[in-house]
Amino acid sequence: MPGVSLQQINKQFGNDTAVSPTDLEFNDGELTALLGPSGCGKTTLIRMIAGLETPSGGRILLDGQNITDQPAHIRRFGMVFQSFALFPHLTVTDNVGYSLKINGVGKEQREQRAQELLDLVQMPQFGKRRIGELSGGQRQRVAIARALAQQPSIFLLDEPMSALDAKLREEMQVELRLLQQRLGITTIVVTHDQREAMTMADRIVVMKKGQVEQVGTPDEIYNNPASLFVASFIGKANFINGIIRRGTVIVGNNELATADKPGFIDGSSVTLFSRPERCRIVDNTGENTMRGEVTYVRNVGSLFEYHLTTDIGPLIIEKPNLQGNSPITKGQQILVQLPADSIKTFPALAA
Ligand code: ATP
C-alpha cells in the first residue's frame, strides 16, 4: 500500500488562508488522524488529498508520483464523508457495487465483490435491504464497504462517525480500526474528537488555524504535547501560572520543582501543565506537595475526579474507582503532590 506526501500544500479562499503551506507524510499502511477544532482546515486538507479541492500551491505525491493535478476520479481513493450519501432507492448490494457498475464490471462479479465486502463489514445478510431499512451504524458500514469496492490505495474519511450516537461511535471506532489493520490500507481520518483520534490512529496530526501544531503517536501527543494548545485540546489537564526565579518555578508562596528544566530566564511568566491522573494524594509533605480542599467529587464510573482548591490555584485530580465508592468526600482536606516528572513547562500565553 502506498503512502502520501504533502509538500508545501496550501489553500487560500480569497484573502483567507484555510491551510498554510504544510509538509506532511502519511505513512504506508498507517491510520493518521487529522485533529483540530472547527475551522482549522482539516476538511480542506483531506479534500485536496482526495482531488476535490484544488490546492493554491504545493504538491501531493502518491508513492513518490506527483498527483497534484490528477482529478479525483483518476486517483480513485476510497472516501467516506460526513453524510454517507448512500442511494436510498438502491439495495445495499447495489450501493456497495455502484462504483464497479460505473466502471463496467458485470453483474455477477459486482454482486460477488459486494458480498465479500458485506462479509468484511459484518453485514453478510443485508444485501437485499434498502438503505431506509438500516440503522445509522449499518449505513456507515455500507458506506465503508462501498468506498472499499474498488480496492482503493488510500482510504479517506471525514468525520465518518458524526451521525452516530456516543456508544455506537465508540464501537465503530474499534471496528473501523480493526478493519483498517486487517486490510493494511493507508488511511486518513478527519475528526474534531480527540478520543476518536486517540482510539484509532497510529499518528495524530493536530491542527490549529490552518497550521500543523504537532505530529505524533497518541502517546507522544498525550504525554508530551508540543504546545499549550495541544495540551488543552487533548484530554484533561491542569494549568498553573508561575514565574521563573533562580531556575525554579514560583507559584504564589510555593516553589515547584519541574523535571523538564526549561531554559527560561529569570522573571519569565510560565504555565505549568500536569495531567490529573499523574497528581498524587499523599500522607506526608515533601517535594511539590500542597494542601487542598475538595470542592467537588465527580463520579465518572471507572474513576473519580476531585476538584480542589489549593495554594497554587484550582486543581483536578483523578483516581481509579477501585472499591465502588469514593474514599474522599467533599469538604475534606488532603495533601496533594505534583511529581516533578509529571510537569511540563510552557511559556505563558500572552494575556
Ligand atoms: P469543521 O470541523 O467545522 O468541518 P475544518 O477544520 O474541517 O472545520 P475547513 O472546513 O477546512 O475546516 O475550513 C477551514 C477554513 O476555510 C474555514 O475558515 C472555512 O470557513 C474556510 N472555507 C472552507 N471551505 C471554503 C469555501 N469553499 N469557500 C470559502 N471559505 C472556505
Image (tube, rainbow, N blue to C red):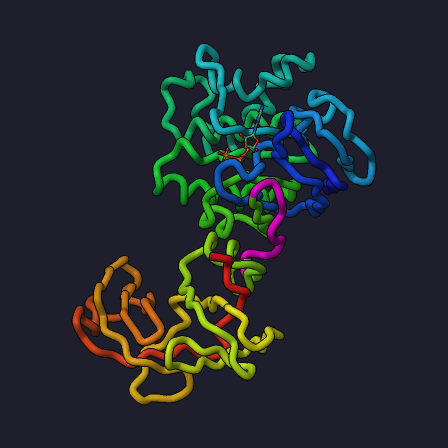
Residue at the (82%, 35%) spot, across then down: 65
User: Quarter of the image holding residue 62?
Assistant: top right
Q: Give the position of the N terminus as an image quadrant.
A: top right
Residue at the (40%, 64%) spot, across then down: 238
Whether residue 3 is situated above or below residue 231 in the rendered picture? above
**Residue 2 visible in image:** no
Residue at the (54%, 79%) spot, across then down: 259
Residues drawn in magenta: 209-219
Please, which residue is most extreme toward the top here?
A: 89
- 253 and 41: which one is in front? 253
247 lies left or right of 336: right
Where does residue 257 sit, x and y in percent of width and height? 48, 81
- 346 and 136: which one is in front? 346
Where does residue 109 sit, x and y in percent of width and height? 64, 19
340 lies left or right of 106: left
| Magenta stretch contains residue 28 | no
Where does residue 103 sit, x and y in percent of width and height? 69, 15
User: Quarter of the image holding residue 298?
Assistant: bottom left
316 lies left or right of 58: left
